[in-house]
Every structure is written in C-alpha cells, then in structure tokens.
Amino acid sequence: MTISMYDASVGVFVPYLRNLSALLDKGVAYAESRKFNPAVLLGMRMAPNMYDLAQQIGEACRHATVAPALLADQEPVALPALEHDIAGLQARIATSIEFIESLSRAEIDSAAERNVFFRLKNGTELPFTGRTLLLTFSVPQFFFHVTTSYDLLRHAGVELVKRDFLGPRER
C-alpha cells in the first residue's frame, strides 16, 4: 500500500486543525456556562516551562503550515504574532487550513526525496528529505501540540472525549 505525501500531510493536518478549532469552541462554551472568561483557558499550561494553550495552538498551526509549504516548495503563510485571544486563534487555525488547502498536490507528492530545511525559531536549519520531514518531525510535532491542547482543556474540566480529538468519522 502506498500513501501520497499530500494525503500524509494535507490529508492529516486539515481535519485535525478543524478538530482543534472545535476543541477550542467547546472550551469557550464550557467557560461561558460556568461564567468565567474563556481567555483564562489560553494561559493554562501543564508545567511552568511548557507552552500554554495559546502557544500550543500556535505551534500546531506552525507545523501544519510550514511542512506542506516546504514540500510544495512555497513560502509558508505569514501568520500574525500570536495573541492570547480566542478569535485570533480561531482565525489562525482558519488561515492555516486555507493556506494548506491551496497548495499543489502534485508539488507535495513529488517532494518525498527532495532535500528541505526546516528553520527553528532560533534560526538553526535542520536538513531533511520531504519524507523524513513529514514522518519523523512535522507530523509528530503537530500531534504533540494538538494532543497537549486537548489535554489542557480536558484538565480544565471541559467535557471532552476521544471522539472530540479524533473528530467526525469520514468515509
């Protein structure tokens, strides 16, 4: 069985970004039902030296946009500075989805063996092939941040189940 680079990137990132958006909506509904400001959730973190919820969402969007852009040999979408604001995070997720969906299937599919370089925030560039970028770095990073976002909301008391993480079943 083979799976295309496009399906392994765009086909994974887009539905899970939609799920992440829905998780955030559930967090807002939870906060409003308990009469506290939903923005409080955005500052939650699991440990003092870990990213908070807003940063987890920001990193999920970053990995979901940079990897497919590198595979398509395009510049990643320029996302605005990260704000601790629900509407801003929802807009970031929507912008990420729109950008990812705009990329060429043919370009992404042809990138498996092409050399690409992922630039860390400190400027260091990590070398990969398209396949190793996707399978050993970007997808694991993306799921780390989406899972941590789910866990933070669940820890805050938001009534979530695995189906919320996985999203609607597509056939």
Image (spheres, rainbow, N blue to C red):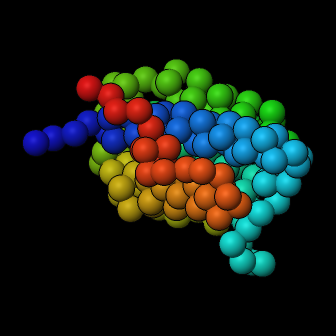
In this rendering, the answer to whether 132 lies above or below 91 is below
In the drawing, does residue 95 fall left or right of residue 145? right
Q: Residue furthest left?
A: 1
> Which quadrant is home to the N terminus?
top left
Q: At x 48% / y 34%, what residue is drawn?
A: 14
Report the number of discs. Answer: 0
Horizontal side of 68 relative to 3 (left or right) equals right
Tell me if residue 25 comes above or below residue 142 in the rendering: above
Q: Position of residue 166 (x, y in %)?
A: 42, 44
* Residue 110 visible in the shown view: no
Residue 146 image point, x, y percent: 55, 53
Taking 152 as reference, is 5 left or right? left
Residue sitting at the far bottom: 48
Q: Nearer the viewer, residue 66 or 152?
A: 152
Q: Quadrant of residue 18?
A: top right
Residue 167: x and y in percent read 44, 38
Quadrant of image for the C terminus: top left
- Residue at left offset 73%, top offset 45%: 30
Q: Is residue 99 left or right of residue 33?
A: left
**Vertical order, 74 against 133 (above or below):** above
Query: Extreme front residue here?
Result: 34
Displayed quadrant of residue 4: top left
Residues 165 and 161: in front is 161
- Residue at the image position 36 percent from the left and 56 percent from the top: 135
Q: Is residue 125 visible?
A: yes
Q: Which residue is pictured at 67% across the width and 58% down the height? A: 157
